[in-house]
Structures are given as C-alpha cells and as structure tokens.
Image: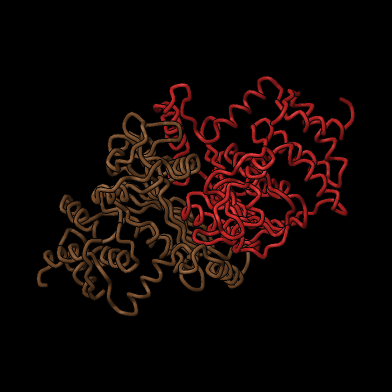
Chain colours: A brown, B red
Amino acid sequence: MTRATVVAVDELRDRLTRLLSATVLSETDAVRLAAYFVDAEVSGRTSHGLQRLAGLLAALEGLDGPTRLETRQHGPSAWSVEANGAPGLLAAQRAVELAMASEATSVAAVGVTGFAGTTGALGHFTDQVARGGRIGLCMVACESGVAPVGGIDPVLGTNPLAVSFPTDADPVTVDISTAAVSYGTLQLLARAGRPAPEGTVIDSAGRSSTDPLAADSGAQLPMAAHKGYGLGLVVELLAGAMLGAKVGRLAAPGTDGLLLVVAPVDQFRPRDLVMLDAGRLVEELRDSRPADPAHPVRVPGDRAAKARHRSHTTGTVSLDASLWDDLLARTGGS
Amino acid sequence: MTRATVVAVDELRDRLTRLLSATVLSETDAVRLAAYFVDAEVSGRTSHGLQRLAGLLAALEGLDGPTRLETRQHGPSAWSVEANGAPGLLAAQRAVELAMASEATSVAAVGVTGFAGTTGALGHFTDQVARGGRIGLCMVACESGVAPVGGIDPVLGTNPLAVSFPTDADPVTVDISTAAVSYGTLQLLARAGRPAPEGTVIDSAGRSSTDPLAADSGAQLPMAAHKGYGLGLVVELLAGAMLGAKVGRLAAPGTDGLLLVVAPVDQFRPRDLVMLDAGRLVEELRDSRPADPAHPVRVPGDRAAKARHRSHTTGTVSLDASLWDDLLARTGGS
C-alpha cells in the first residue's frame, strides 16, 4: 500500500454498487460483488480487494449480456455451476449460496467451471460457510505456473486451498497457496523492485532465480517441496480432473475449476461440545508462550477478524488512496 | 536400514499371522495386521513397517482380552469407531472397511477414537480406498509436539494428512506430516548421530536447535511456517475437536483421533472422463522436463507402487535383517 486514506464503509459499498450496477450485471449480482470487495478490504485481504476491480470491469465490458450462471444438481448433495464466462467472484458466491441452502446434516459439494478471471480470496467464501455454522473447504485448479519437485516445467497451477472451521467467536480460516509464494506476491515484489525469496522461482532453464519475473518464462516452486507438490496435485485432481476443468499445461483461460465442500460439525457429537473443544484449542494457542513477548501467538483468521471488527466499530476502512481515487473518478464526485 | 535381507513375501505374511494369532487378537484381526505390515514393507514404507512390530506386541500384552471395537452409525453416511484401547492400526482398518461398505454415491465419514499406539502410515489406508475406486482422505490429531508460528509451546500434534485419488493405474497418494519433519525422522536422525535440519526444532527456551532430541523438551516446528501451522490446526479441529479426541497439550496417551473421509469421483461427470484427465495429468508430470536428466519427475505414490510391483513380480521383499531376525526368533526356525 502506498498512501492510505480512510473512508466510510457505507460510502465504499454504495459507490461500488452504483459502479457495478451500471455494467451488464444484474442489480443482485452488483450487490454481491460490492459485498465481496467491501469484505476483502475490511478484512485486510487487500491483495484480493479493490486492486482487482479494474480487471473485473474490463472483463465485464467483454460480456455481451447479463451473466448467466447455470446450476445443475447431480445428486442429493452435489451441484455444479457452469458460469458461461461470468466472473469467478460471482460463480464462487453462487457456490456458497447453493451449498448453504443444502440439507445441513450432510456433506454438500459444488463444482464450478467456465468462470472468467479470479475467484478472489478463497477464505472469503469458506468464512461465510463457517459463519453459517458449517465447515467450508474450497480449492481452485488454476493457471499453470508451478513445477513438480524434480522438474522444471510449470505443469500445475498455484492451486490455492482454504478451510474455515466455525467457533463460537470468529471462524478459524486457513487460506494458502500450494506454491511457495503466491503469484500475486511475486508481482508485488517485481513492482517494488525486490527479489523473490530463495527457493521460490526458477528460470526457463530450471536454474534457481531471485527475479520474481523469471517465473513467467520459468516456473514457481511448490511450498515445502514434495508436500506442496502433493497438495497442489490433489487440488488439480479434485478441482480440475474431477470437475472437467483444467489439468496440466494446456489449459486455456477460463478453464479453471473451483470445488467447494461444506460439511456439518455435529455429525459425531453435539455441536456445543465441538464448539467447547474448538474454543479451548484456539484459546490455548493464543495463551501459549510467544517467541517474542511483544507478539502473542495468533490463530489463522485472527488478523482478518480483528480488522473486520475494527471497521464494524468505526464504520470506516483504510484504503490505498490511488484505488479510492480511481473509484471516485469512476463514480463521480470526490 | 542397516543390513538388508531378501525374504519371500508369503513367508513374511505367514510368520506375522502366526505371531499375531498367538496374542489376544482374533484370527481375523491377526490377518488384518499381518496384511498391514506386509504392505508397509513391500511398499517401502519402512518407517511405519516392521520396526513398529515390537511396540505393537508390547501394547497387545497390556490388553486383558480380545480387542473390542465398537461401531456406531450417526447418520446415513457417518460412523464412529470407539477402539477401547485396541491398536490404532486395527481401528484405522475398521474405518476403511466401514467406509468402503457404505453407499458408493455419497461422501462417507468415519471418526475413530480410543485407540492405542500408532495408526501406521495413513497412505496405507487411503490407498486401499482409492484402489476401491473412491477418493480417500485421512488425518490424525496426535500427541502434541508442534509449536504454532510465533510460539514456543508444543500445542499441536504433528497431525499427519493423507489423500489418495484413483487412476486407471496406481492411485496418486500424498501422505505428509504437517510438522516440518516427522517425529519418526527426528528419532532416526538422533540414532544416526546426525543433526536435525535447520528450522525444524526449537529447544524449551524457544531457541532454534539442530539437536533432534531437543524437540522432546522443546518443540517441533510446522512445515512451511504459517501454512503448515494452519493445516495442522485444521487437522486438530477436524480429527480432534469434532470427534471428541485430543485438542492441545493436555492430551493423554490414547486420546488421538482419526478421521477418514471417502468420496466418489463421479459425482460431477462420468468416471471414465475423470480417469482420462487424471491419467493425462499424471503422464504430463512424468513426461515433463526433469531438473536432472538422470531422474525423471515422479508422482506422489510412484515409489511405493513401483516397490510393490517389484515384490509382486519376484514374490520377495527386502527387509532390515535385524527386524527379520527378530521375527524369526519370535516365530521359531530360521
């Protein structure tokens, strides 16, 4: 973030809704997408926030009519969504709505294909599921960029994975790329003129590189060597091969696949007992001895939840000033 | 492995079955466990093979009667197994049998608690599921040993996780610890007088250490920093809090929890299309450019499958000679 500016959350939401309603989107979809961007910003997920707006608007200009998401039911608790080129953010949100409307006592799965552009931060979607009281698991088989261990061709996608587990307070949300660092991080480093961390990028000849842009002609490396390679492959099998979305290098844009799985927490014992133990574990982690006394141990999701609560209390959010200026320019006034 | 000896697989199975039948185990359970050890050895999973036999036998001596696994159904596709102190290996095998007997068109979940000792290599169990044509996911919330990122207390277990996906050839099997290195690896290093890799162990004051035994009073570190911390926490929520098994440090022995999830591959489109794409992805990885031309790129599960095929062809398996000698001594003859 370069320069920051503090704005009212309501004004942010209003301007986004107005801007998005003026596109091919239906009013409902405009509201959905505005809610996504507001949540990304108030949760501090800025890498998947307003900086993705311009790309989304450009993609919407390419559509020749309103988005048309086709839903198909494949069994008592499996659905697929064919997005017909609609933005990934909308398609992922539809998946959440379908899964949350399903029978709460069994495991539901939704496969999403045919969407354009990013699905956004997957934790945004699993977090909604957990706030609804269920476990959310989401993964995306996406554009190739990661070489297998022992290889130098970028066969696998960066294939992110998110899980949210409900607690009586905020959900625990884990949201990771199976690449050593996300592609977005490499782009941020390149723009800042900074090197890529050792062991994250190779050039086209397979040589280790610290040039973040080397990954574009070479490859990214998986997180934790064979462990990240394995998990990335599992994501590509589940969200790619199983759904009929991309597998391997030959994928064209718009062939990404997203799998959302929603499961009850109380299949094995009463919810209140599960919540008691989940809360106890989270507290034990927070109360455990920190390496640095000035920095208590955090639980995944803490930072986003804290930022969100702060915005809720103040009614404001801190934004990258240039992104806000851009939104002002697009929506009139200042 | 110190010195190796080649033995007939049939003799290995016979001796194991004979030895285990002479314990409190039923004949069926003895056969189940013998099959586990044979498979671990022919698949090259030696860290979870015969070297665990002595520990199992000692645990069985502590039982005052035959094992008694209690199964309970919680819904159309959820079961729990209370092992009443039976070995984890048997309890995990029961979970596989229950899940595989379930309706093949929906997602089945089995929670296992109350077992003693190790559950063995989780890939052994998910691999069976995938050979039966379905996707297997297995995780264990186990004895505490791993500190959270930013912390120094070993709150979480090393919490391993395995996934197998079927293909028309051998399954893809990913089997990882969410700790940077497994506890078993640290013990092997300690015995060999070798240091622990940088960034895997801290001492009781939270200082980085290369003494593999420092983890016993200090802690292990998660794989890939916050990513492994997050995944380890998810395992402890799902296989611990959700099942009523261990959460956090206060766990006593016998409080580990195991969760097995089995899912169909053809909920979204026909199996043959899924298998076609899965096979294509696996081949593309194997055919991709290797970093070292002498070492083609491997797919997770390749090494175990190759070892298993070799044993199947020759009818023999290579064992640690001292472990084989021990088995001979326990079963008579030479």
- In the displayed image of the protein, which residue is found farthest to the top? B314
* Visible residue check, residue A202: yes
- In the displayed image of the protein, which residue is found farthest to the right? B332
A166 or A295: nearer the viewer? A295
Quadrant where the C terminus of chain A lies? bottom left
Q: Can you say whether B234 is above or below B314 in the image?
A: below
Give the mark count: 0
Quadrant where the N terminus of chain A lies? bottom left
Residue B264, position as x, y percentages in the image: 52, 45
Q: Is residue B203 left or right of residue B286?
A: right
**Residue for point 40% across, 45% down:** A179
Residue A202, position as x, y percentages in the image: 35, 36
**Residue for point 66% across, 20% down:** B313
**Residue for point 26% across, 47% down:** A190
Residue A323, position as x, y percentages in the image: 19, 62
* Visible residue check, residue B79: no
B292 or B279: nearer the viewer? B292
- In the displayed image of the protein, which residue is found farthest to the bottom? A313
Q: Can you say whether B273 is above or below B65 in the image?
A: above
Q: For residue A205, which quarter of the picture? A: top left
Q: Is residue A128 left or right of residue B180?
A: left
Residue A168, position as x, y percentages in the image: 51, 73
**Residue for point 47% across, 53% down:** B227
